[in-house]
Image (cartoon, helix red, strand yellow):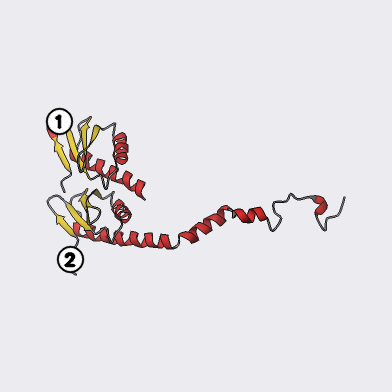
Amino acid sequence: MNNIKIIRPFKKIQIKLNPVFYSRSAIEETLEDFKDICSGKIKKSQSNFIISLKAKEKIDLEKLGYEFLNHAFAKKKEMVT
Amino acid sequence: MSLPEKLENFKINQKENSIIISVNPKIYALEVIYSAAYMFLDKVYVIIDGDPENQVLIQLKAKNEGENLKKLAEDFNNELINYSVYVVQAARTGEIREAIVKRALGVVEEDLWEKDPEGIAEPWKPEKAEGLEEE
């Protein structure tokens, strides 16, 4: 499972998420919550959501990516249960 | 105690400080898996992937170095059972809970209200009161 790709020179992160387990609305809400720290886009490939994040300030990119994942997961969980 | 290979449903990756747990969705509903994983959000980063029909994979990546990964996986398995029991019990006691809440909130069944067997809906009139002396 390698869902996070970090492109350090461009302060960018790419996250791949399975749409069966994560919904677009949960990801969009997470993007909204993270708007002060990073900007982002969601694309839908054949089998995954591809989320591109660009940090607005100097920040630990790996931590940003994983915190984004946890936040999106929590949003989705709240929708399911 | 070591588990037979078939029962051990997790793989530890010390280098990445993470574990991947495999869960059979025919045994544990997706709702249960989400709830169990949610319990660990303060300690780990959670990623869910896999096939919802056959095998759900949950990656837990510890936030801190030195986390006991094996214990984490075992605790996760316990949480799966914990939430499964909760879901079953909630379904079993659903009607009772609903009745208790209805009573607590004073919700009256529609037909009983219309029949008004105790005459509660009738406005009280002093002339109908018994045992009261006139001033």
Q: Position of residue B71 (x, y in %)?
A: 22, 60
Tell me the kind of residue under disc 1: Phe
Residue situated in front as seen by the camera: A45 or B38:
A45
Tell me the kind of residue under disc 2: Lys
Q: Position of residue A13 (x, y in %)?
A: 18, 36
Residue at coordinates 49% horizontally, 59% vertically from top-left?
Answer: B97
Residue at coordinates 54% horizontally, 55% vertically from top-left?
Answer: B102
Residue situated in front as seen by the camera: A11 or A53:
A53
Residue identifier under label 2: B6
Q: Position of residue A57 (x, y in %)?
A: 22, 30
Q: Could you say whether the residue bearing mark 1 is in a helix, strand or loop?
A: helix
Query: Are discs 2 and 1 located on one and the same chain?
Result: no
Distance between the alpha carbons at the discs numbered 2 and 1: 44 Å
Residue B121 visible here: yes
Residue at coordinates 30% horizontally, 54% vertically from top-left?
Answer: B30
Residue at coordinates 64% horizontally, 53% vertically from top-left?
Answer: B113
